[in-house]
Amino acid sequence: MTQRIIIVDDDQSVREALIDFLASQGFSAWGAVDGRNLDAVLIEIVPDLVILDVMLPGENGVAICKRLVDQRIPVLMLSALGSTPDRVLGLEGGADDYIAKPFDPRELLARVRSVLRRDLRAAERDTKSHSTSDYRFGAWCFDVEEKVLLDPQGSELRLTLGELSLLTAFVRNPNKLLSRSRLQDLVQGPGSESFDRAVDLAVSRLRRKLAERDEAVIIETVRGEGYRFRPSVSRP
């Protein structure tokens, strides 16, 4: 099935150029000028990815991003603001990746493909290596194939795609010290661009959500070295 991408940018020339470029690369692409227009498009289309500009009229891109990740729609943030604080702002909103204007179309394409294949790669590993996709840690149950995490009370905890990929990396490497670069390789694949702050933010978001349902320390920070997933992990 052709993968579907929505580009949200109020600059018509940028929007149309991206639609044409992505279509030439085999994707189905649609455009939207702002958040309201995007909501109308989402009624008709369930996208595999949204490329979202930060600076939009009305509701800004970060606020829209937070709504999209609640629906588990991957987001690639796009903005003329390229400084580290602005990248952090986009990633804190739950974006899966961030690219600053102006950009090389080849880099954009590489980032698009990286985000899109992240969950496909995890699913393929599950199919080849495991007869079941359930992992248990403490009183939690995580089905990595169905992307469902049940808390100790049996209620589902909603995570973004990026957080699900990060948790998958942790449960497959319990009690191991994982550096930021190693975590990034496990989540995004070897050779992905290193951005330590992005890893720290992703871990912080995941840890905060887990802590809302369980007081136990699940993800330990090893200062200056990385992170360790502390619970024992079992397979049914």
Image (tube, grey):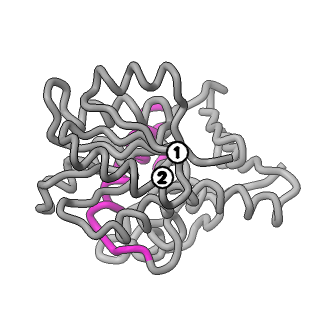
Image-based side of 213 in relation to 88, left or right: right
Q: Which residue is mark 2?
A: 23
Q: Amino acid at mark 1?
A: Ser
Q: Which residues are magenta?
A: 192-218
Q: Residue at x 14, y 29 (%)?
A: 57
Residue 115, percent from left and from top: 48, 57
Q: Residue at x 33, y 66 (%)?
A: 105
Q: Quarter-wise, where is residue 10 in the image?
A: top left
Upstream in sequence: badge 2 or badge 1: 2
Q: Residue at x 73, y 64 (%)?
A: 125
The secondary structure type at the circle numbered 1 is strand
Give above or below for 106 relative to 123.
below
Residue 107 among magenta residues: no
Q: Amino acid at mark 2?
A: Ala
Label 1 CA crowd tier, 10 Å (few <14, some 14–19, many 20+) = some
Give above or below for 194 relative to 167.
below
Q: Which residue is mark 1?
A: 28
Give above or below for 77 relative to 186.
above
Label 2 CA crowd tier, 10 Å (few <14, some 14–19, many 20+) = some
Image-based side of 165 in relation to 196, left or right: right
Contact flag, marks 2 and 1 (Cβ < 8 Å): yes
Residue 143: numbered disc: none
Answer whether residue 203 is visible to the viewer in this image: no
